[in-house]
Amino acid sequence: MSGAPGQELIGKPSDEFRDLEKIRRQSLAESSQGAFLIIAVWVLGFGLLLALGVKEMGLSILVMLGVAGATGWIHKHWHQNAEGHYQNIYKRQVVPALVRSLQPGMTFISDRGIEEHTFISANLYWWGIPGLRPSIERYMSEDLSIGYVGRTRLRVADVHAEHEKGDKGDSYGTLFRGVFIEADFHKDFRTELYLMPENYLKSASMVFSSELGERMDLENPDFEKAFVVFGQDSVEARYILTPDMQERLLLLKKVLGNDLRIAFKDSNVYIATSINKDMFDPQLSRPANCPEQIKELTQQLAACFHVVEVLDLNTRIWSKQ
Amino acid sequence: MIALGVLLGVLVLVVALMYNGFISRRNRLRNGFAAMDVQLKKRWDLVPRLVETVRGYASHEQELFERVTRARRGIELAESAGPERFSHEQDLGAGVARVMLLAEDYPELKAGEQFLNLQRNLSEVEAQIAAARRAFNAAVTDWNDGVEKFPGNLLAGVFGFRVHDWFETPRAQRKVTDIQL
């Protein structure tokens, strides 16, 4: 491998990119055709209203708004289908190569994710009263990167978890949307430890915080400002959160964003970083071999794999091999 | 008369609450020390094996080995959580770190299965000791705050509660956990 990761893919007019570009143009054309069709429906509808001689301006506007809403909804789905088709092919052909160029020990599988039970058992997000009703009603995970970074087993995936909303339970609200990471921690431990964001104490979830254990104060004031720590054993909490690890977690927060929740459980570390968009997805509006897009995807993936280095998980001088 | 009774009742209640607070802090302190003691004992157990393994290669470092052995014996004889014990523990930690550094000069020793195993165990124990020491020192801070701050200091004087020593570690000992395999 030479140069920066992903560099070999940038600007390369390979057959793969030529085929992808064809698919992108077709998908874009389908989406545009949908838009033209909708405009045509609008013009036709408006003309029909005028032709029928509807005098009531208010009613006309209402009808037009209804048509606009319905056609807008149809177009959105039309566009999503076209974009989804292109993205699926792109993620099968380009992203795995990007992942390999970043980390030879990692593999990308676009149609697989991290299992719901793993996300739930990490205990970082829940809804409702634990034990009385299911915490997550709808769960979707995709774009799985799996393998080893050095000596550390790692899984990274896009996750969208939703809870029930309203009394009738017929609508859903987002509980978590972002990247979920599972990594093998470099030390063995028995108990559980949770790091929540600093605003966690003000949230409603705080009511159930006893589920997470006792609140713990550590010695680093910057760390105390950045995270609220819950755990079951003060010695083991400090075994995991060494002064060096606290500094590294502060750095990780800078890399992955402020809305970061971390669980240490079963000798693994689970990281959930909330991002209000789908990660690792190319845009239909950009050419298939667009250098900026490839750079962005590379940066997104690199930031996730960087967790191992930031937390120094490959240093295995303790009892865990 | 009633007012005096109420005042006395409130006073007794405040003293009882403060006293119970001291007892909780003292129990946390003892618990913290017990957790640390377990790890210190593990290191204490590992030292003879380490000395024997390294002595075979660096017999001329007799003075260092004797110092480590002396510190180890000192721990055995010292009072459980007193300053003398902490001082011996610090000497032992510093001595062990120096013995580990000696291995750098002997590639054959460093590559040996037995030494690698010892090094890994020692790194683990040192990390556990560091964690336990921080938890213990947090409990000591909490206790000392209670003893020294007003109005706790008034009650501490009456019940004979005194400030407790922190357990600090010499800089040299930190190097043990930095060793790369």
Image (spheres, helix red, strand yellow):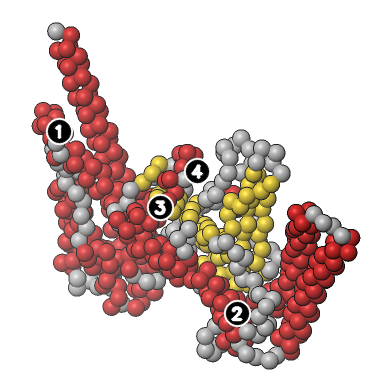
Q: Quadrant of the N terminus of chain B?
A: top left
Q: Which corner quadrant holds the C terminus of chain B? A: bottom left
Density class for disc 4 (Cα within 10 Å; few <14, some 14-19, many ≥20) is some
- The numbered mark at residue B8 is none
A311 over B2 or under it: above or below: below
| Residue drawn at (45%, 68%) of the image | A255
* Three-letter amino acid code of the residue under disc 4: Ser
Q: CA distance from mark 3 to mark 4?
A: 13 Å
Instruction: Please give the label number shown on residue A293.
Output: 2
Query: Do the residues indicated by labels 1 and 3 lie within the same chain of the protein?
Result: no
Amino acid type shown at disc 1: Pro
Subunit of mark 3? A
Instruction: Find disc 4 in the rendering and name its residue.
Output: A205
Residue B151: assigned label? 1
- Both labels 2 and 3 in a single chain: yes
SS assignment at label 2? helix
Determine whether label 1 and label 3 are within 8 Å by CB: no
Query: CA gap, disc 2 to disc 1?
Result: 64 Å
Pick the residue in front: A84 or A46: A46
Please provide percent x and percent y for residue B92. 21, 58
- The residues bearing labels 2 and 3 have C-alpha atoms spaced at a distance of 33 Å
Marks 2/1 same chain? no
Residue on which disc 3 sits: A198
Q: CA distance from mark 1 to mark 3?
A: 32 Å
